[in-house]
């Protein structure tokens, strides 16, 4: 299992467009990608679950990646967050 934390820099937070891109990116991996903030968790492949977390600019999200390709998936997810959020 690989984990990392990321503080959201997008001024709108995780809204529809980046949430959709995130879900699409997470579906490319065999590993399970999970987001957690303030006790709420969501599968990164579920657009509505991500949106339901209400992540705003300045919030820190913990990302957990677990599965066969977790090394690659964690690295690519972290790069995704830095580039898009």
Image (tube, helix red, strand yellow):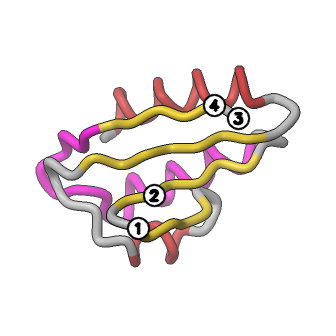
Say few, some or many: other residues with alpha carbon within 10 Å of mark 3 (under 14 / 14 to 19 / 20 or more). few
For mark 4, what is the residue?
Answer: 2
Rounded to the nearest whole Å, what is the CA distance between mark 2 and mark 3?
Answer: 15 Å
Rounded to the nearest whole Å, what is the CA distance between mark 4 and mark 2?
Answer: 14 Å
For mark 1, what is the residue?
Answer: 39
Say few, some or many: other residues with alpha carbon within 10 Å of mark 1 (under 14 / 14 to 19 / 20 or more). few
Q: Residue at x 18, y 40 (%)?
A: 9
Q: Residue at x 58, y 56 (%)?
A: 44
Decide if residue 51 is on the left or right side of residue 14.
right
Q: Earlier in the sequence, mark 2 or mark 3?
A: 3
Decide if residue 69 is on the left or right side of residue 43.
right
Q: Magenta stretch?
A: 7-28
Helix, strand or loop at disc 2? strand
For mark 3, what is the residue?
Answer: 1
Q: Position of residue 31 (x, y in %)?
A: 78, 42
Q: Position of residue 68 (x, y in %)?
A: 87, 33
Observer-nearest of 15 and 30: 30
Q: Is residue 11 magenta?
A: yes
Decide if residue 19 is on the left or right side of residue 42.
left
Rounded to the nearest whole Å, what is the CA distance between mark 3 and mark 1?
Answer: 19 Å
Q: Earlier in the sequence, mark 3 or mark 1?
A: 3
Look at the image and tell me in which quarter the N terminus lies. Answer: top right
Say few, some or many: other residues with alpha carbon within 10 Å of mark 4 (under 14 / 14 to 19 / 20 or more). some
Q: Position of residue 77 (x, y in %)?
A: 54, 33
Q: Is residue 24 above or below residue 51?
A: above
Can you name the residue that lies furthest to the right here?
Answer: 68
């Amino acid at each position: 299992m690989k984990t990392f934390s990321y503080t959201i820099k997008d001024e709108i937070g995780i809204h529809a467009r980046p949430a959709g891109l995130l879900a699409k990116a997470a579906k490319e991996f065999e590993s399970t990608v999970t987001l957690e903030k303030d006790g709420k968790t969501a599968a990164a492949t579920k657009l509505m679950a991500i949106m339901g977390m209400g992540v705003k600019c300045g919030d820190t999200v913990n990302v957990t990646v677990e599965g066969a390709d977790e090394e690659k998936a964690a690295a690519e997810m972290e790069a995704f967050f830095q580039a898009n959020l």
